[in-house]
Image (spheres, coloured by chain):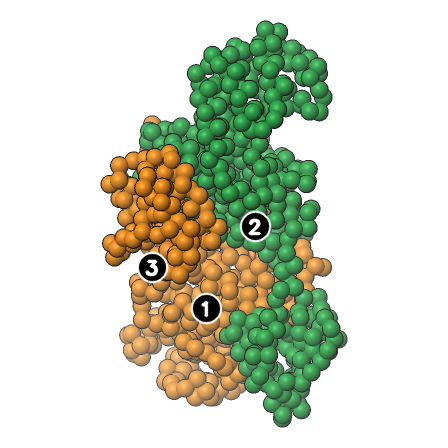
Chain colours: A green, B orange
Amino acid sequence: MQKPSLPKGTRDFSPEEVQKREYIINILKKHFSTYSFHPIETPSFENLSTLTGKYGEEGDRLIFKILNSGDFLKKVKPEDLDANPASVTTKVSDKALRYDLTVPFARYVVQHQNEINFPFRRYQIQPVWRADRPQKGRFREFYQCDADIVGSTSLWQEIELIQLYDACYTELGLGTEIHINNRKVLSGLAEVANIQDQLIDFTVALDKLDKIGREKVIEEMQQKGISEDAIAKLSPVFDIKGSFAEQTEALKEVLSTSEIGLEGIDELNFINENLVGLNSADLVLNLTLARGLEYYTGSILEVKAKGVEMGSIGGGGRYNDLTGIFGLKNMPGVGISFGLDRTYLVLEELGLFPDFDDSKVKILFINFGENEARESIKLVQKLRGSGIQSELYPDNAKLKKQFSYGDKGGFTHVVMIGGDEIENQTLSLKDLKTGDQQTIEQGKLVDFINELS
Amino acid sequence: MQKPSLPKGTRDFSPEEVQKREYIINILKKHFSTYSFHPIETPSFENLSTLTGKYGEEGDRLIFKILNSGDFLKKVKPEDLDANPASVTTKVSDKALRYDLTVPFARYVVQHQNEINFPFRRYQIQPVWRADRPQKGRFREFYQCDADIVGSTSLWQEIELIQLYDACYTELGLGTEIHINNRKVLSGLAEVANIQDQLIDFTVALDKLDKIGREKVIEEMQQKGISEDAIAKLSPVFDIKGSFAEQTEALKEVLSTSEIGLEGIDELNFINENLVGLNSADLVLNLTLARGLEYYTGSILEVKAKGVEMGSIGGGGRYNDLTGIFGLKNMPGVGISFGLDRTYLVLEELGLFPDFDDSKVKILFINFGENEARESIKLVQKLRGSGIQSELYPDNAKLKKQFSYGDKGGFTHVVMIGGDEIENQTLSLKDLKTGDQQTIEQGKLVDFINELS
């Protein structure tokens, strides 16, 4: 007899966990909808050719491929057995599991371009799969929650997306810092200092300024081969502080000779100046933010939760060209992603999930035998018809067993209908929290419970 | 440049389709919850060994296997290239996509048996994948919506599940026939007539009684090798009619020598007699119902929509042993499944989906330039804060283009804030249905819209 287990990196979700995950997802959906984003869904697997070559060599390796049906070995030749496995993959597999939501979205936009009302505001909440080495907080199956707007280069959309982050996390009870950078500013810095090839080394080292201090940061930059001259040119960046506007003002001087850099500053300022009505989020200029440099061309965003140590819980940015890979040109856009698993962990750690059980009446009918159950099921049916969660214990088991089921199951009330109660058309209602018990006419149960909830 | 396409048997869902699917799913979830079922989720892929051998040889073939990562060919030997592919599968794949929700549920129950409060009422709404030949209404990725209760043999649960079907389909506006049969009755018929090996042939032929008439049915039975003697013994079944109780009464005579058959009759009667409060569903005794004979041991259920030609839109039954395959004995249960795709098609065909757009205000702000947009985005933000879907057109495009976007996008109102309106702190609100236009103070917009909706 096999002992069942799960593939590594995958998880079961218990009722309690599903409830918590849906709590988050429903809040996201509510605000996505108020912000006028529209849901789409794409299939779990795509043609392998749709996915390969989009995520780099490492990404291609981490895509889960699906074995062709039937005689999957028919194209494999004996010499293939000694070849590089990657080169044989397409002979045994022509489909693969979704690796992210962006490439399927790009495919969707191209395939449905004639039905879409551009600018297209879409959201998508679906699982993705990666053959990554599993570790704490990293799984092989996990949900992505993405909101993107394609078909316009307007910076008002960055403002909306920042407001959307704020709206969602505020309702979840979570204070956040929304870090923003701009690809053009990074390009400008690289241009000014002539460190195009060392840009990432520069930002990685700069990111440690608070932790290890100016000297060590400069040391690290030197070790990475960044020239003294470049470091000198960029050193004013080390001292940038003050308000968002003061920081961009100082940056403007550093970037005064870089057209693209100054454009980036203008974009940052436009967003900061026009961003109104944030509730619990702070906008933070963060020059070390360098995610997605391969595809982001303007704004870069990342969200960190306040009050807890947990990398980013969301991120996104602006791209010039979503769909060029599939032959549709001039499709700029901007998008953000919410990290469901990380957000879950943060809410758990900070105790921010509501007490779902507390807010809801849940009634167990004790089963005293067939006749009694017959009376009970009628009332159960009436309660359910009024939207009240209720349940008849299915068997005439010992009372202790039935009550134990009620306790463990989080029921708020127990109803008992025995012979006397049938005769009098009454019932005994016991409040499991207070222990109080009272007799009620059967016909008045629904109203009575409705007044409780 | 590749032209993107989808793997056969898979689908994109547009915003409109997602909305309709979620409409159905949310109604199911609401009633699942009122009926005290708890949601679980299991991973999309399981260990291959968890799935194989559970669905028969044909089923095993239709399971989508996932190619092992890395050097997936390392266990394949040259002679394997000429072998039966099925025998090589486990050398290149140790994981596979979920084929249904039942086997993963069984695994879940075994793995989590110490955390579960039995009888366990679980529901699960997730996609499954089958490498079936795609055809109208049959896809390679589709959702199953299952509700099961395990840990009790009580027939009250059948009653609840029938009521649950009724509650869901009633709210969806759909009249249904819920067909019921009992495995024990079928066993009894087989026993009485000694046709254990021809039971399916018998029910398949019997199913055609209304269409082709008694003589042709008997002819078909004879062709299938059912003896004259057996047909004679079972012939009273051809004439069974009347109410549910009259039918079971007549069946009782046919089955008078079969203990198990009579047990089945008692179960059917218990369910029929105690079933109260159906709204739009009729319970129909259907002896030709023979689904899931490999695992159903008691009640067998199937739902058909009234007023439309469309096989079954749901089905289920009782099983003695859910988890024996994974080493946990004595886990009886009963479950039902809702067919999401079929239900969708039926609602579409009968025009039963509500007009979602009709019930909801949706406001587009026209973009007249930076200053005007700055005023507009503040109001957009306020409307969204009050839960009203609204949106600023991102670019200062031609009015015609902006209004065309508003028309296609299903907006109910357009707001225009130009120079005059900024000065007077007013706005022009245009109702896109009536064409009426009026001037409103900016500060009163939210209240005004709230009164509309």
Dot 3 falls on which chain?
B
Residue B334 found in image quarter = bottom right
Q: Quadrant of the N terminus of chain A?
A: bottom right
> Disc 1 vs disc 2: Cβ atoms closer than 8 Å?
no
Disc 1 versus disc 2: distance between alpha carbons?
A: 31 Å
For label 1, count other residues whose C-alpha is less than 10 Å away and answer few (under 14), some (14-19) or many (20+): many
Q: Helix or strand or loop: what does disc 2 sit on?
A: helix
> Disc 3 vs disc 2: Cβ atoms closer than 8 Å?
no
Q: Quadrant of the C terminus of chain A?
A: bottom right
The residue at which mark 1 appears reads as: B168
Q: Which mark is residue B358?
A: 3
Q: Helix or strand or loop: what does disc 3 sit on?
A: helix
Which x, y percent locates residue B119? 64, 68
Q: Residue at x 62, y 7 (%)?
A: A228
Examine the rendered structure and indicate whether residue B16 appears above or below residue A207: below
Viewer-proximal residue, B64 or A365?
A365
Residue B320 found in image quarter = bottom right
Examine the rendered structure and indicate whether residue A389 appears above or below residue B10: below
Disc 1 versus disc 3: distance between alpha carbons?
A: 23 Å
Please name the amino acid that badge 3 sits on: Asp
Please name the amino acid that badge 1 sits on: Cys
In this picture, residue B5 sits left or right of residue B39 = left
Please name the amino acid that badge 2 sits on: Glu
In this picture, residue B111 sits left or right of residue B173 = right
Which x, y percent locates residue B68? 56, 36
Inspect this view and state whether residue B135 appears: no
Dot 2 falls on which chain?
A
Q: Helix or strand or loop: what does disc 1 sit on?
A: helix
Have a look at marks 1 and 2 and say if they share a chain: no
